[in-house]
Image (tube, rainbow, N blue to C red):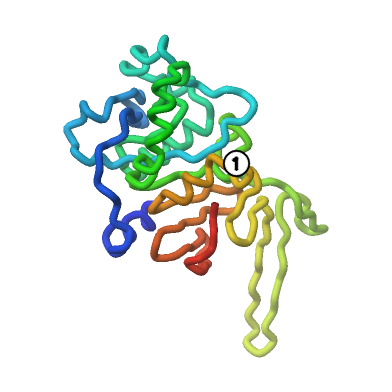
Amino acid sequence: MRTWLQVCQSSHSNCTLKTGDPPTRLIEVGSQNGREPRLVYGNDLTEQHPEYAALSYCWGDTLPTRAIKATETEFRMRIPYRTLPRTFQDSITIARMLRLPYIWIDALCIIQDDPADWEREATRMQQIYSGSTLTIAASGAKDTSAGFFAHETPRFRSASVPAERALFTFGNSATGKTMIVQVQDRGGLHNGMAPILQTRGWTLQESALSHRIVQCVQSELYWRCSQGCQTESGVLLPTTTNLS
């Protein structure tokens, strides 16, 4: 992800972000072994155009940790990382590793029990997602507890390899060389589309508005920007491929 982002920022003139006012609120991601995340107001930041990630995800049936009137003051002091659902934790970890100081997560950046605030912020989705440095999509997560880092799912079985993978050996009689291929199935689709995030109409706008988006599915990572699409394994896809 870091390489994709660095190349895009330094080489892709068509991926220049719109520079407008920062979001009303952002989450300062803190550090791995130091500062906890906390809620900050865009107008209070010293940066005129702060770099931030935006999260695209499914809430699911269980309400995640949310910013409400009763917790807003507390969240401005700190948001304990360990109390956040896994999807939020994973997205904050990625932002930290990409050296992005802030992230926008709707459940934490919109006061959920304030109808006026929700209505006002909902009209700013274009500004929020088109102004983000990167959108991180938890494409295969059914809810906020699932997270989106890939993990091995045992599906293939082989007589010689009893669990989690299948091995195939290809020999070249002319050269005498042998190639061993390991195959694992972690549920990815050929074009990066994931059935969970794809079923949510609200997330369609998030994908369409983003200049850069990385899709996290169980098979691998998928990157899309205005210059094209590619996968973690090195496959290049047509620029018209829809990875949402």
Q: Is residue 30 visible?
A: no
Residue position marked by numbered label 1 in the rendering: 200
Q: Residue at x 76, y 54 (%)?
A: 156
**Where does the image place residue 101, in percent across and percent down from the top left?**
30, 36
**Where does the image place residue 117, in percent across and percent down from the top left?**
39, 22
In this view, the residue in front, 150 or 178, is: 150
**Where does the image place residue 43, in percent across and percent down from the top left?**
22, 28
Q: Is residue 215 visible?
A: yes
In this view, the residue in front, 208 or 187, is: 208
Question: As drawn, which residue projects farthest toward the bottom?
Answer: 174
**Where does the image place residue 106, in percent across and percent down from the top left?**
44, 30
For mark 1, give the secondary structure.
Answer: loop
Q: Residue at x 59, y 60 (%)?
A: 191
Q: Residue at x 42, y 45 (%)?
A: 135
Q: Vertical placement of 79 versus 235: above or below?
A: above
Q: Vertical placement of 146 versus 184: above or below?
A: above
Q: Residue at x 42, y 36 (%)?
A: 93
Q: Amino acid at mark 1?
A: Arg
- Quarter assignment of residue 147: top right
Question: As drawn, which residue projects farthest toward the right?
Answer: 159
Answer left or right for 177 relative to 64: right
Q: How many marks?
A: 1
In this view, the residue in front, 121 or 240, is: 121
Q: Sort mark 1 into few (<14), some (14-19) or many (20+) by Cα contacts within 10 Å.
A: few
Answer left or right for 139 relative to 166: left
